[in-house]
Amino acid sequence: MAVYKIFPEKDTTIYSEFPNTNTGLDPILEVKNTSMGLTNDPQVARALIKFSSSEMIKVTDIISNTVVGTSPSLSPSAIGLYSASLKLFTSDTNNLPDNYDIYCYAVSQSWQAGTGKYLFDPPYVQDCTWYNRENGTLWATSSLLPDTTMSFLPNNPGGGSWFSTYLSSQSFAINTTKDTDIDVTPIVETFNNFLFLENNGFILKFDDQYEFNVSSSYSLKFFSRDTHTIYAPQLEFRWDDSVYNTGSLTLLTNQNVAITLGNNLGSYTSDSVCQFRVNARPIYPPRQFNTVSVFTLNSALPSSSYYAIQDLDTEEYVVNFSEEHTKVSCDTAGNFFTLYTAGFQPERYYKILIKSTFDNGSSVIYDNDYIFKINK
């Protein structure tokens, strides 16, 4: 199983309250509704974010090669073989309803991020704003392309335009995390097929029930690509590249297992492809006659074994255990998994964890402090 992350090439927030203000270098992305009272128009904010087409094509070529062995090409041969999720991490929330939805659409027009920030005084008024999308060109508010739409108050036109037929969303309840993990696979697959949809990125907004609401105010703030933290937005690709063939290896059936990582180099670049070999043997081997030491013989972890990658300082999972996407493979030499370090923050340390579920139903996480660093 495999996970590959890419960072955005640009992002910004557009504010109806400040329709000529650009925030292309702001460290925060915002989705909000601000009630101005029953006699005044409410104000909203929407976030725009775009990932590189060439990076998306690169990932789908990797997927094609690892899953079906096809040669790279511009045609999206990996369609149907992966999932893609838009992940943003909250910096602050305010007055959110108990239950709400975040909508994510494919943007229908090009836009320029700009070099402004929310608190610039005077404000930076070039490039992408509520009114403009790039170089003084207004967002379309009429004569739209087929299947495109927009929404704004009559006296405040703008706010972006998007394809109404290319929608992804995520629902949030009162006790759930407010970080997004929006399945945008159908949109990404269409981006990668240039005949259907040009990649102008995504626009995120509250659902219509909460946008332009005159009685309440809601705010979600996320870290942007210009954050000075490790929580930059990500487009995360997940797919199944696993194999499981134990050959003549002995299958381990209980949790009394000693695990070592045989080929951890300790440091890698941010574009490495690493195949980690997981050596496993029973702690208490059966007593029998052998011509070699039983402590040098490799065994096979059960097929329900998974890996995870944890940030060493924050202890947050950069890649979490997943039955669909982080399965440990096995061949006749032993267990292994492939890790793509793209999307890992440089100059940070990470820890490898292994989890196995055995025949008796017990699950064990093996944490042996196998640590590596990502270099610039």
Image (cartoon, rainbow, N blue to C red):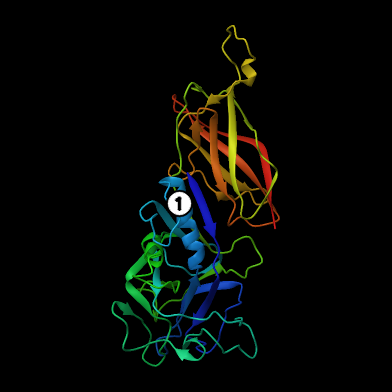
Amino acid on which disc 1 is placed: Ile
Q: Position of residue 73 (x, y in %)?
A: 43, 59
Q: Is residue 145 visible?
A: yes
Q: Position of residue 294 (x, y in %)?
A: 62, 16
In front of the other: 12 or 52: 52
Residue plotted at (49% across, 32% down): 330
In front of the other: 251 or 76: 76
Q: Position of residue 311 (x, y in %)?
A: 63, 50
Q: How many marks?
A: 1
33 versus 229 height, above or below: below
Residue bearing mark 1 = 63
Quadrant position of residue 100: bottom left
Quadrant position of residue 360: top left
Label 1, residues with CA under 10 Å away: few <14, some 14-19, many ≥20: many
343 versus 109 height, above or below: above
Q: Secondary structure at mark 1?
A: helix
Q: Is residue 177 visible?
A: no
- Which residue sits furthest left? 146
Q: Quadrant of the C terminus?
A: bottom right
Residue plotted at (61% across, 47% down): 310
17 versus 170 height, above or below: below
Residue plotted at (54% across, 86% down): 127
Q: Position of residue 169 (x, y in %)?
A: 38, 64
Quadrant position of residue 90: bottom right
Specify whether 50 is left or right of 152. Answer: right
Residue plotted at (58% across, 64% down): 232
